[in-house]
Amino acid sequence: MQPGMQPGMQPGMQPGMQPGAPAAHGPYHQIKHPSMIGTQVPSAWVQKQDYIFAGPIQVGDLVVIQVSDGTRRFAEVCRQSGPDMWDLLVTVTPQQTIHQGIGGASLGRVQNASMSAVRDQHFYELQHPDLIDTPMPATWIQQQDFRFSGPLQVGDLVLVQRSDGSMKFAEVMKHNGADLWDLIVKIAPQQQLYRNCHGATLGRPDAQSLAILENHKSVFNTWNTMEQEHEGILLQQTATINRAKEFLRDTHPEVASRSQSWVARAGFAGVSKNPEDWGQEFTVEASYTGPHVKWPLKLENVREVVHHIRAHPDYPLHPKYIAQIVGTGMQMFETLPTSVAEMSVPTGPDGRLVVLGDTHGQLHDLLWVLELHGEPSPSCAYLLNGDMADRGKYAVEIIIIVLMYKILYPENVIMNRGNHEALDLNRVYGFGAEVSEKHHPNLNMMFQNLFKELPVATVVDSKVFVVHGGLPRDPRVELKDIRKVERKVLELARPTCLDTGIMWDLLWADPMEHHLGVMMNPNRGEDVVFFGADITHHFLSQNALSLCIRSHQVPTTNRGFEYCHGGRLLTLFTASNYCGCTNNTGAVAILRSNLSIELKEHMAPPLEQIAQMTMEADARQEALLAQDKARLLSLEDSAAKMREEVLTKIEAKVLSKKSDLWLYWATQAAGQATIPLAVWREGMTNKLQLQIDWSTLEDGLVEVDAGGNVDYMRFLDKYQPQDEHGIPLKEGWEAKMVHKVYEQVLRCDWTPEELMQHFDPDGDGLVTLMEFKDGLAAAGLSLPEWQIDTLLRTIERDELGKLSLSAFLDRFQVVYSTSSDKDLLSDVSLETKALLSDVGRRLIGEKSRMEVFQAMDADHNGFIDEQEFFTALETLDFSELSAEQKGNLWRLVDITQDGRVNYLEFCAAFEIVDTSDGGKQAQKEMVASILAVLNENKAALAYALSFFDTKLEGKVTKEEFKSALRALNASIERPEGAADPFTEDQLEVVAESLQADQDGLTDVSHLFSAMSVQC
């Protein structure tokens, strides 16, 4: 049985599935007729003229069925269950329902001609589906950004003033006369038609303003994709970290007993594991001028602390008080009887529940919500739906404020757990660094123990299901199963069984609008799924629930909320202007005791302004009046900031996939220096695994010539990593590292004939890319493929992409000789180096090195031994050399010290002049590739180093550093049978090049913060 699998599970099963059970609704179906499904069939339609009962019916066909109220409605075939049975998708507003096993006699297939006619007559195809009903940007000015004059055309985007006074986009769907139009306005979850709207009530956006708006939408979509993709990469890093953890526990059990987690390490540092004792290890210094927390906690004390945080957010609360608050809060959540919390909306005329989505360390959003909607109280409950931690710089303050109110009003304040309330993500996304650097490292253990006690979901008044991510992929999972989930884990386990599968989906899954069932989410990474409307409706129905509120992502509308799945699922996101660039509004949902929902959007002022407002009541009132009138950024500035972030992330991906991109394009180029722009896009999409619109980014990424072609080598050369790996290394380590790469090649110990056979098997005197790779593979090198590709990328070829064998060997030698610079030969005298150069000039002269080598190989065994070398010296009139001088020369030539010199060693010893400076370029590219791999896996390296830092001092020995690198080497995912990312020799170079103090310890504390990702 595989680790973590439940009895009875079979390998390859979906988490939570029973043996032999099919996946939900079979193959995933993309809806083909979204605007017609569930609508009534025209009364004029005649059976057999407009729809027929005969087959064959196919998946995706539009059909007619008679529903329970006697009306005939359109449905779509989403699966064929047998020769005469189908599963149908029917939209019954506001939900979608799967009708299983409908027989052929009960439906008719729509005739193509009739379907075209009804679509043209009754259904309008939206031209601006993403903008309809979205609010007009607050920075728009009448007459500059929109105007009230015509002429209007069908399909035009217009602005209408709604009954609440807001200006929102609508679309002209029919022209009724000179000054009258029919408009369509999407009011979630349905579309509503506004008829006979007069021109004076609307304005048409200016073309330039609309272009800016659409560009912002496009850039936001790309940014959002990259953001999720980046989170997926870090999910992969958590998998690498887990493999490193197992490797280190197996290889260093004596350290593992003290270093399994922050909990164990904090205990080793003297912190009690009993939350009642937390805070006792800290003493409040006389110099501390912040607020003091007194027990039992009173409302006045809470307000004092909140006021301090508002006014002085960068003057942290004392660690003693943080520890006490976290410990008390943890004990309260610890008493929850199940993994699902139960909550009621306070009754009374002012009773309400304020639900918040992600805040991600954006303290100004929480403070602004408290300002707008009031603090928690007996009549005002608060529910935070996860992801308080990571990214922003003030997650600790957010959690402390919420916990203090939780202590005051236990039943009226709940925090759900999000996917970022987990140890593995906190290591790399900033919360761990925030706690350690701004507060105290020992507090990390306390927060992690708090997180594992948080509920994974909350049910409000038995009708509203509030969860951070999504719903379980297995339709058999009920609320009672979620209540039984083992939530008390520091890190989320991958979905390998029912329990872990449920927990994973609740915190990670995302909804999808145009597919049914579940499917993998390529952006978020391995094991993360999308779930369709059928999953939502089935879950709500079988558990007698009305609505699911979830968070986890910035809505695609770039607002603080978004309905989907027929209005049965609401995405809520509270962090406004997320990461300081997206210009999205944040939102909260306010539930009343009758379960009515009011969505309130906001754009929170900067923290500095809130601090000023705290001190100045007039400024606070002014901001309240103005906060809906202006955004923090113009659309242009917001798009520019998001674009900059996107380009930075793409740069990192290009660096990590440089060899893959080069090989893809070089193969397509067929020896040409350029490739068509379309081929460039294909390479970026396929090798970076990014499904984004490259056309919107090309002007910032690549130069395109007049013929529409891209110089791909020039593009790749543009990307060089900054030396930000954070490892304190001595000068000259790069040359040593590259030297080890070429030393591997020299150890092949081939004769010239064997070289010919391996690198030029067809005997045409030319080396192709594949012949090069096959030749190195035949040598049995332990070099990873990415290093081989990097080496090959630096070797110049002809216009057909080939290299003459003799030129290849000379070029390869120059690369090696350059890497063997004076730093590597520091123990060899200048006199010996000069003598060797003189020998080389006399030996080679006008001849090729192959000819000279073969002439010196007197016994024709393919190698030059010591005596053959000395004989050659005598023929060159070097008879005056002493035995010691000859011995020094021989030791310099015999690089591998095996008593004989192969051809590559001979080439390395007697270099030719490299006028192209290609050798330095080769070293630069190889070091760049090495740094890219280290940067891509820096979170795993940070964990491996922290494993040995049991005393939380931020220091390790050279041997411990080497062990951490070995763990990283063993843990990076690669194809089966592939070589390790780094050779043992290269690991040795890094370890020996470390800078250390007088005690032999290397300070790596800065590495831990360097590994975190923040907005």
Image (cartoon, grey):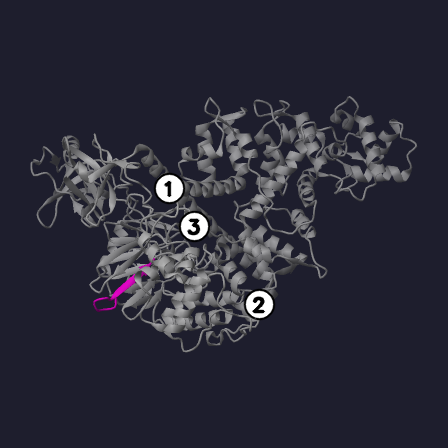
Q: Amino acid at mark 3?
A: Cys
C-alpha span from label 3 to label 1: 15 Å
Report which residue position mark 3 lands on.
579
Q: Nearer the viewer, mark 2 or mark 3?
A: 3
The amino acid type, in three-letter code, at marker 1 is Leu
Q: 578 or 531, which is in the foreground?
A: 578
CB of mark 1 within 8 Å of CB of mark 2? no
The amino acid beneath tag 2 is: Arg
Instruction: Tell me which numbered mark, 1 or 2, is placed earlier along the sequence.
Output: 2
Label 1: how many Cα within 10 Å (few below 14, some 14–19, many 20+): many
The CA span between labels 1 and 2 is 52 Å
Residue 182, x across and y down, in percent = 16, 37
Q: Which residue is denoted by mark 1 in the rendering? A: 635
Residue 350 in the magenta stretch? The answer is: yes
Locate residue 917: give its quadrant: top right
* Helix, strand or loop under label 2: loop
Count how many numbered circles sit on residues in the image: 3
Mark 1 against mark 2, which lies toward the viewer? 1
- Disc 3 vs disc 1: which is toward the camera? 1
